[in-house]
Amino acid sequence: MTEGPRLDRSLTLHFQGDWGGANLHRVCGWLSQAMGERCGPYSRFAIWNGRGWTDAPRAVGRGQVDVALATPAAFAAMAYTGRGPFADESYPFLRAVGSVPQNDRLVLAVGAEHGVRSFADLRERRLPLRIATSPDDGVNFIGLAVARILELEGVAPATLERWGGGFLYHEQPFPCVDAARTGGADAVFHEAIMTPPWQALAAEREVHFIPIDGDVLAQLERDYGWPRGTLPAGYLRGLDAPLETLDFSDFLLMVRADMPDDVAYLLAWCLGEERARLERYYRHLPPERSPVTYPLDPAKMARTPIPLHPGAERYYREYGYL
């Protein structure tokens, strides 16, 4: 074991990740092992299944778990600022331990046979598209973002349904992308853009990637703090120009402000100094195609959209990352 901090006492910590088999859960497993090696002999660590959206900051804020991850980081920050779905129940005592960097975008791709290249085309032609996406159910950040974008673009879900279109809903991205690839849907509006299903869609079906209008992106940033992002030309087949859309990056690791400083310090230390353990799960993928963007950089991990826990901040400063 490498040199580093240890706690003599035993801890019991509850983590919350994703559905059980995706990247948030992997981060929880990595950190709980690293923590367990550096705490007292009777330490216990539980990982609760979650969804990785609004449920994550709520679980921490309500004291149901000690540590939770959500993505994208900027969306989870609404729980701290009291915006959007957290307007009636915010958690100003949330603190960050750090973030796990990953480069993602929320993307709308429409079958090329429909001739749609912009939201203006869709409005003017009133096409009855079937869009595969996630539901706006009060928990899922994708469904929330898609619904707000469509409303601001003048194609609210109810409007699309009046034109004869509709939605194919699924919690996770891959069934949605696959529905567009196989023709079960006319379009897909989702994230996880770096993953093989998106590459397969672009390779097997001619699609047009639809930019989000600049005034809409500006409104979303004003209202919710959601940043814009660009997908570079050539990232997928058929993407001939940079695509302006929403940035959907990073996993935010959240705790409460009342977590003991030495526990938050050790969590942050494990996040930064044991990072090679997590990276090895992704090194078979090119960095730009990996759901975790390696090599992990603690200086980037320290840049979070909510304040760092003082214990975590002490780690980043002591090691020169802040």
Image (tube, grey):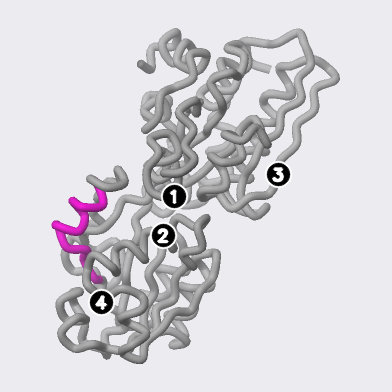
Marks 2/1 in contact by CB < 8 Å: the verdict is yes
In the image, what residue type sits under mark 2?
Leu
Residue at image mark 3: 48
Residues at marks 1 and 3, CA–CA distance in whole angstroms: 22 Å
Mark 2 vs 4, N-terminal side: 2
Marks 2/4 in contact by CB < 8 Å: the verdict is no
SS of the residue at dot 4? strand
Check residue 208 in the rendering and tell me which mark sits there, or answer none: 4
In the image, what residue type sits under mark 3?
Trp
User: Does the segment drawn in magenta span residue 216?
Assistant: yes
Residue 250 lies, in percent from the top left, at: 42, 42
User: Does the segment drawn in magenta span residue 15?
Assistant: no
Residue at image mark 2: 144
Check residue 85 in the rendering and tell me which mark sits there, or answer none: 1
Q: Nearer the viewer, mark 2 or mark 1?
A: 1
Mark 3 vs 4, N-terminal side: 3
Mark 1 vs 4, N-terminal side: 1
Q: Residue at x 46, y 64 (%)?
A: 136
In the image, what residue type sits under mark 4?
His
Mark 1 vs 3, N-terminal side: 3
Q: In this view, does 248 lie above or below 265?
A: below
Q: In this view, does 69 lie above or below 3?
A: below
Residue 169 lies, in percent from the top left, at: 51, 74
Which stretch is magenta?
210-221
Predominant SS along the magenta part: helix
